[in-house]
Image: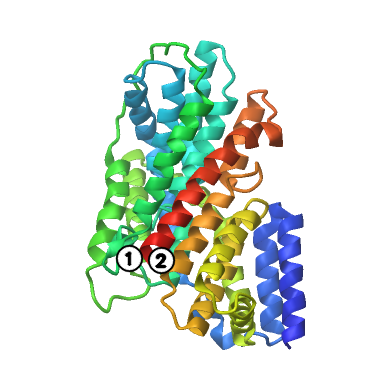
Amino acid sequence: MKTTTIILFALTYLLLLAIPKRRALIAVSSAVIFVVLGILPISKVFATIDWNVILMIAGTMGVVTLFIESRMPSLLADLIIEKVPNVKWAIVSLALFAGIISAFVDNVATVLMVAPIAVTIAKKLKISPVASVIAIAISSNLQGAATLVGDTTSIMLGSAAEMNFLDFFFYQGKIGLFWVVECGAFVSTFVLLWLFRKEKASMPEFERTKIEDYIPTVLLVGIVVLLILASFLENKPDVTNGIICMSMFAIGIIRKMIKSKDFTTLTSALKEIDYDTIFLLAGLFVVIGGLVEVGLIGDIGAFFVKASKNNVFLIYTLIVWASVLFSAFIDNIPYTATMLPVVAAISKELGIDPTLLYFGLLVGATLGGNITPIGASANITGLGMLRKEGYEVSAPEFMKISVPFTLSAVVTGYVLLWFIWG
């Protein structure tokens, strides 16, 4: 059974790489095969899927859609741009702004919000928007690991490690992943300033965006506040965070339907949810449940321990930099979903707290996607926007910015995590 499981899992991964536009179908089909062949008993399928993760992603995506429609991100960007003296600082400020937004909003949504502003500035100055959009995309990827709701991988880690919103800031009496990510962002900001040192053109005047609906902003802030409050509850249901996110989304949709008196609003909002990611995750949860069921996850963990001769630093280094390498070419969601239980198995085999390895995995997997144009959905989205504007971006052109930015952030996180948690 183990041999069959390995072959099916390898085939699933190869298909995910070869046909990225059909990821959800591939993952769900693989999950069905796992169940039909008896690799994972049908009685365990429902329990294997992490419904808290699924609900958090769906609810957050829905609220973010309303937030974007309210044009609040554009107003915030306008306020920032009014304060900067030239294009260099505009690019860096927009990248930092995208990072801040991305700590609470999906990375792709962040790019869709902020990149058009950079394109508009470039048109007014009659310059290329390529460098600015790349900076926005990679900055949003970096900050996605900062909080529990910043990225799908963060939500997955929070569930696997049973971490709440505040644990990303302070955990077990030590500074958490948020501050490590922010230190990486601080260092990488100097890299951006150096890369864009020649962009000294003055900024044009902008008409400030007008906001008529502040409720979506309240709902988004409400998610964060309620997640913080929920972290203090003991013995709460496993799906508490998911229910919070979905409830905020439901409130926003019901209010919008009442206000517009248009019940097609519900259909439109539901269409905005990224079902591809949701079905991909659901299928992967079942597939990985099958790997656990036949004992493969434990075997992989034991192999890592044996190969490193029980050296925690070597295992930590391997996990971080292997994650950077793999995530540069494959989507970090299936990779992280696969590696989280492996990290737990490695920690159990060594008899150590898994926090260091969990954090190292997230830093490597999240930031590694920044290296190449295809390594992260935010990169693909940003380059797609540039393509519509008539700009084709080559891999070398992208990597001139992404590689120094990513390496500076990863090295900073790698060193800090070992210093704090090693």
Amino acid type of the residue tagged 1 in the rendering: Asn
Q: Earlier in the sequence, mark 2 or mark 1?
A: 2
Classify 10 Å Cα crowding around label 2: few (below 14), some (14-19), many (20 and above).
many
Amino acid type of the residue tagged 2 in the rendering: Gly
Identify the residue at horizontal 33%, vertical 69% (top origin): 240
Residue labelled with disc 2:
158
For the residue pair 91 and 1, the one nearer the viewer reads as 91
Residue 332: image x %, image y %?
Answer: 58, 57
Identify the residue at horizontal 72%, vertical 57% (top origin): 17
Q: State yes or no: discs 2 and 1 in contact (Cβ < 8 Å).
A: yes
Q: Is residue 260 above or below residue 412?
A: above
* Cα distance between the residues tagged 2 and 1: 6 Å
Residue 163: image x %, image y %?
Answer: 36, 68
Identify the residue at horizontal 56%, vertical 33% (top origin): 134
For the residue pair 316 and 272, the one nearer the viewer reads as 316
Q: In which image quadrant can residue 333 be found?
A: bottom right
Residue 345: image x %, image y %?
Answer: 53, 80
Q: In which image quadrant can residue 93 be found?
A: top left
Mark on residue 226? Answer: none
For the residue pair 38 and 298, the one nearer the viewer reads as 298
Q: Is residue 398 above or below residue 301?
A: above
Q: How many marks?
A: 2
Q: Is residue 12 visible?
A: yes
Residue labelled with disc 1:
164
SS assignment at label 2? helix
Identify the residue at horizontal 41%, vertical 76% (top origin): 353
For the residue pair 332 and 309, the one nearer the viewer reads as 309
Q: Which image quarter holds the C terminus?
A: bottom left
Q: Is residue 279 visible?
A: no
Q: Is residue 202 above or below residue 411?
A: above
Coloration of the structure image:
rainbow
Residue 409: image x %, image y %?
Answer: 48, 46
